[in-house]
Image: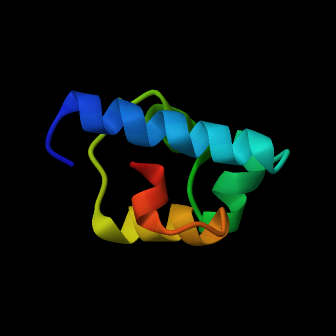
Amino acid sequence: MDTRKDRLRFGQRVRERREEQSLSQRKLALMIGMDNTYLGRIEAGRCSLSIDTMSRIASALDVEIRELF
């Protein structure tokens, strides 16, 4: 992702989808093999992500990557 705005939007949508599915950060992080504090940073838009990481998150949330932008 190129900009902070993109990271914030992605993180916000991840949080929305996660909450819609009644998943805690910890549960989603375990599902994708990630530390829950890192997931928190993603949701806050504080880190750049690889396509692989975005794909793992989207897959765990059962959505297409594009739905998170």
Q: Residue furthest right?
A: 22
Q: Nearer the viewer, residue 24 or 65?
A: 65
Residue drawn 41% across the image and 42% down it: 10
In this picture, residue 31 sits left or right of residue 54? right
Q: Relative to residue 1, is residue 47 depicted above or below?
A: above
Q: Is residue 46 above or below residue 29?
A: above
Q: Residue at x 26, y 29 (%)?
A: 5
Residue 8, position as x, y percentages in the image? 37, 30
For residue 50, which quarter of the picture? bottom left
Count numbered badges in the picture.
0
Residue 59 position within the rendered picture, expressed as x and y whole percent measured from the top left: 58, 72
**In the depicted view, which residue is nearer to us: 46 or 8?**
8
Q: Residue furthest left?
A: 2
Residue at x 65%, y 54% (from the top left corner): 29
User: Residue 60, relative to residue 11: is it above or below?
Assistant: below
Q: In the shown orientation, is residue 34 left or right of residue 20?
A: left
The picture places residue 21, in percent across and down from the top left corner, at 81, 51
Whether residue 4 is visible here, answered yes or no, is yes
Position of residue 4 relative to residue 39, above or below, is above
x, y percentage for residue 56?
51, 69
Q: Residue at x 70, y 65 (%)?
A: 31
Coloured how? rainbow
Asked whether residue 24 is in view, the answer is: no
Q: Is residue 3 left or right of residue 65?
A: left
